Image (cartoon, rainbow, N blue to C red):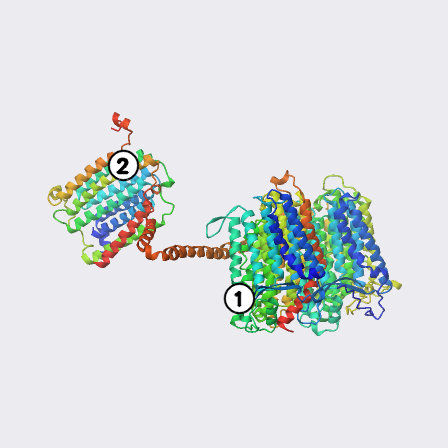
Amino acid sequence: MTLADWIAEPVNWAFLAMAFPMVLAALRVVTSRNVVHAALFLVLALAASAGLFLLLSAEFVAWVLVLVYIGAVVVLFLFGIMITRAPIGKETNLSHKKIWPAAVASLAVFGVTFWLIYELGEQVGGFSDTLPAVGQATPTEILGEGFINIYLIPFEAVGFLLLAALIGGITLARKDLSPAEEREGAGL
Amino acid sequence: MVLTQFLVLGALMFSIGVFGLLSRRNAVTILLSVELMLAAVNINLVAFEAFWNTAAAHGQIFAIFVITIAAAEVGIGLAIILLVFRNRASGNIDELDLMRW
Amino acid sequence: MAWFESVGLSLTVFLPAAGALALFALPKAQENAQKLLALVVTGLTAVLAVGVAANFDYGRSERFQFEVTESWIPAIGARYHIGVDGISLPLLVLSAVVTLLAVIYSWDHWEEPRNVRGFLALMLLLATGMNGTFVALDLVLFFIFFELVLLPMYFMIGIWGDSSKRRIPVLGRTVTMRLYAAIKFFIFTLFGSAFMLLGFLALYFRSGDFLPANTFDIPALIALGAENAFGSGTFAFLVFGAMFLGFAVKVPMWPFHTWLPDAHTAAPTVGSVLLAAILLKLGSYAFLRISIPILPEMAREWAPFIGLLAVIGIIYGSLACLAQTDVKRLIAFSSVGHMGFVMLGIATMTDVGFNASLIGMVAHGLITGLLFFLAGSMHHRYHTREIARLGGNQKLMPWMGGILAFTAMASLGLPGLAGFWGEFMSLLGAYRPLAGLSSSQFQTYMVIGAIGTVLTAGYMLWMLQRVNLGEPKAEWADRSFHDVETTEWLAWAPLIVAIVVIGVYPQVILGSTTDAVVNLARTAFGG
Amino acid sequence: MVNVSLPLVLAATDGAELSSGGFFAATAWIMLLLPFVAFLAIILVGKRLKGLGAELAIGAMGINLVWASVLLVQNMLEGIYREVGLTIAEIGTLGITDQNLSFELGFVVDGLSIMMYWVVAFVGFLVFLYAHGYMKGDVRVPWFFASLSLFAGSMLVLVGAPNLIQLIIGWEGVGLASYLLIGHYWEHKPNSDAAVKAFMTNKVADVGLILGTILIGPSLGSFRFSALNQAAANHSESLEGVAVVGGLLLFFGAMGKSAQFPLHVWLPDAMAGPTPVSALMHAATMVTAGIYLMARTFPLYQEMATDARAIMLPIAVITLFVLGFLALVADDLKRVLAFSTVSQLGYMMAAVAAGGYTAGLFHLFTHAFFKALLFLGAGSVIHAVHSNNMSDMGGLRKSMPVTFWTFVVGAVSLAGVIPLAGFWSKDEILATLGHEGYTLFMWVAILGAFVTAFYMTRAVSLTFLGTYKGTGHPHESPPVMTGPLVALAIPSVVAGLFNIPGVTWGPIGNFTEWVGHRVVPMGDYHPKSIEWDLAAYGLIAAGAGILLGWRLFAPDAATQTARDRLRIPVLYPLLHKGYYIDDLYMKGVVNPIKGPVARAVDWVNAYVIDTVINGVGALTARIGELVYGRFDQQGIDLVLNATAGGTGWAGGRLRLLQSGKVRQYAAGFVVGALLLVIALVIVI
């Protein structure tokens, strides 16, 4: 598939319309001097990725992403930011002074991954063929079956993990109480 | 749409996440970077799913697992940050070097 | 006066050391008694040195006089052999007199931590080392005296020196000036001395090939050198090189000079004076006493190289002076330039050049010694040595400013004052270097050296302009300062007089040295 | 050691007997020493004296004047030659002679030095007297007179020098004294800058003198002028090879002192000193030294270093012509005079370089009078109006009649109007240039005379004519100041008569004979009769200059439009900036050396050499640590503690990884993951 063919497909324009804001938002997430802005840019990036999932016919995943991430996780983040009284405005202390090691590392990661994609494409083949499954949405039914058939044990494990996280989060986040406070039940 | 474009996008997002991970010193922003990396992974998973087109939609299931675990991770992570902040009045991870020799 | 012939010189050397011991017999609290004792001892030493000069037979100044030779360490053939000739006599007198003046100056100038007894004892010990080096005629003895001066100077700098901090470029470490300077001075010099000792040992073992027994005796080795016994092969080359390293560090020659600005800047006033006036001369004196007469062929071979380093030192020192912001450091760098002229004189390997270096050494001792006295006294009053903060000194302290101007003029080589002759004669020597050396090369050195005199004048006048002239800066304007005080007059007047006398009548030095250096050049290079 | 040498009692060049002089010649050293005695005495007791030391300086100079006058008369009647040297140093043989080279101090009494003694003593005496009035109420009067004495004394040491070494001593002594005097008001930076500039420019030139001495001395085996001149006259082999280079080096030295292009830059700035200093410096001491040196070593240039003329003469002519123009644009009266001195020095140097020994010296002689007169007159004006600038003057003719008339005499004499002194000496220079075949230079010199007349007329007009433009009420100076003016005006008029070509004044002869009383034949040209055509050209040039100046400046001296009219674009800034030579030196040489170059060297010191030293130190310390830590401490105990020690050591090193820095861990994680991926792909 040549670049001209690729551009000719309207769906690819939709892809670009989402991918570009996504990358830009991601960059702002890691460079913004304002923590709140960073979090909100993350929302943007995740929303774009949800859009991509829709393009890839993964509707369920897309909505889960929106609900869980944008609805819950990011709100959690914002709460976290506020609770930790992190400076809401601009802050110079947010990043290291020397960023070149990070830049080098991330470039290396990108380089290696890129090389990997190329190698895999060579070995596996078909990477530049039009994706087959696009068009018809994956039924949620299949996903549900997958969870309780093939992936039942992991599914339970994740549920357990969530419970553990819940308890752990409470334990960690609540104040250490003096015995007197303990008796009065002040922590609850 | 071809697979490569999603893989490259994922790689790009992941690299940006790595950059944020290494260049940030505020704990919350580091967590944000981690979220970026996870999102990149999700893109890969879903794209591969579309590529292989498996009957059981393994890729999407995995993506949902990732989202779930990420949520748990954020919960715990923020709780830790909260705790640290309460003790140290700082979200700067450079100052958290108690666990050293 | 037969007794004087036999023990006079030894007394000159060891009286100060005895005085240092005697100081510790006095209670620590009795500072006046300590000062008086030191004064008497150094005064007596100076009288003895002058007595040696008075009884010296100038008609045969090329011979060693007041010679004493006693068995000392028979196992290695080291003897207690001392004596003076025309070359060492002026330096011996200089050393004894400057030490006396330093004690006079110290009378009411003490650096913290105040410890009069310790400081005076070190100074006396230093005097023994310096005087001893100039009269030693045995390599082992020479080496011991040569190294003996390190110790007191090390402690002087390290204990009473500048306690400010300074960041060392590149290394990135912040150091206390005095500790850094003291250690640098000590290690650097010791580094050179190690090679020097190697050279001495090599000479010792080789001398057995020509003599019945191995010897450290300098006159005996000179006699061998006159026959060119050590030849011009690799052996001689290496021996000369080893001794060169030792002496060049002490002079100091570029590029072995970097201990000097630090040590001078950090040292207490009296330490700087003695360092500049006497210690630097040990190296150049050693060239004339040991390297050249014993290894004349090698001296001829090394001469262009020595000359090159000398002229680099001249230009380099002057340029570095222009960049200095600290008065003492500026004077220290000026020493690099002036010692460049001294070494250029030596490098010509002519009698005129040797004479130039000797009179240059004496003049530099007097002039730079006085400059350091002045810098110390000014620091004492202003509590700063920053040139940028000074100004209008001439107005605040007319006599001090006048003496500073006079000394600066002497230092830049004004004819009619002592500094001129050394520069002029070393250029003269460079015009006609020893036969066999490339004249065009040395004439290039001559021209570069002459340009160096212009630069010297430039930095000295600039320094004068910034320190002495103009209106006093606001921070000093309302203050009143003591102009030159009595002890300062007593310490400086002899130097001023000597600078003028040598300037007008250089024969006072050359009368002693000329026959000796003519003889040195003849025996070493024939002709 | 004491070696008084009286080597030469000889016949003069023209066959006449030269006597060794009487008491005054034998004791001429008193002249050389007296000013130094005065110098010391003033420093020590000057403050406590009524005249603040002025009386000591004037007294010493007065005695000198008596001595010099007696010698002058003696020399007129019978030629004197006496040379005395006292060895001050035997410095070794340089391996080329059997005898030691030696340095000597002494004095020489011959026609040349007597003339100079007298000029220095005469001008010096009058200037000192004048300064006594001028400096009343000034700061540091004792120090001023001490420095003046040092100045005159150094000059006398210089002109009395029988050898190059003493000459150098006097030479740099003069430089030192000029430094002290120019910087007399050192509270202000421009003044001390000017002083430093004078010293440094001279120091640069002194390199030439010193190197020239070094070239000539050893070749000759002696530093004596008599030996040098004799050798040159005999075309001695010993001078072959060094004559031209040595001669040029000496000339380079003279260029500095005598302010020849391009080393003239210090002289205009030297006006920063008090006016009596300028008068002394420009007339008698300092600037004449270079001409004197050329005259003293004249046979060298006349006989052996003739090739050097190709360089000397153009420089002198450039100086006399090109630098004269600078006087046209100066507003500072003293600067006008300073540039005029530069130009006149060019005349003298041109004469000597062309072979006119007598002509050059004669111009030096007459110039000393009228230039001292002009400067003292300028000082008198400045004293009255408290400004150096001509734009603050004007119309002083009425209020300062004595100053005006004497100033006019000096100016006319300088302009070269017959029969005043300046005419005769300048005419002789023109004649010499013409006779030696330098026709072009002769015409340039005539043009130069035109310029001279022009700027002097301008100066007189702007200062004395028209109306007063300053504030206050100028009044005539006290007699102690006008007296010297009158005393100098007289020789400015009549001095020229002593050397009218072909005229001898009975038993006293003429100037040519006086300065010709030398041991070694001069072989120079001096005209035997007046060359009227040349005189006419010179007069026409002078007249034209005066007319033009009068036409331009006299009518509107009050309005000064003429000055504006002279502000020709391009040319005016060029002249005003002195052809940018100063800028060239400062920006091209001095500042780079003071700034970047010096800092670079300092940087090298701190960052290169010291770094090597410190690096070696640190490295050694580290090696020591390793030797101690690994080989000594662990090597010896290796057998016993191999396992424990090794583990401990490894742990100790590895624990460094546990820095506790999350970022480092993360980075390590990323890098590790990357490596794993790469390994994986490669393996698969």
Residue D189 in the image: state x and y as whole percent: 64, 46
Give the letter of the chain under mark 2: B
Which residue is the site of mark 1? C201
Q: Residue furthest top?
A: A184
- Apparent side of residue A80 relative to residue C329 in the rendered image (left or right): left
What's under tag 1, amino acid-wise? Answer: Leu
Query: Which is more toward the observer, D624 or D24?
Result: D624
Is residue D39 placed above or below C239 in the rendered structure? above
Disc 2 to disc 1, how far (Cα)?
76 Å
Cβ–Cβ under 8 Å for marks 2 and 1: no
Q: Residue at x 24, y 36 (%)?
A: A169
Is residue C127 placed above or below A168 in the rendered structure? below
Query: Which is more toward the observer, D475 or C373?
Result: C373
Residue D475 in the image: state x and y as whole percent: 78, 41
Residue A117, by quadrant, is: bottom left
Query: Which is more toward the observer, D391 or D88?
Result: D88
Q: Residue at x 17, y 39 (%)?
A: A160
Kindly identify which numbered label has been placed on residue D227.
Answer: none
Which residue is the site of mark 2? B79
Residue D493, by quadrant, is: bottom right
Pointer 1 local density, CA inside 10 Å: few below 14, some 14–19, many at least 20 = some
Quadrant in which the C terminus of chain C appears: bottom right
Q: Residue furthest right?
A: D506
- Apparent side of residue D21 relative to residue A60 in the rendered image (left or right): right
Residue D571, by quadrant, is: bottom right
Residue D173 in the image: state x and y as whole percent: 71, 56
What's under tag 2, amino acid-wise? Answer: Ala
* Residue D271 in sight from this viewpoint: yes
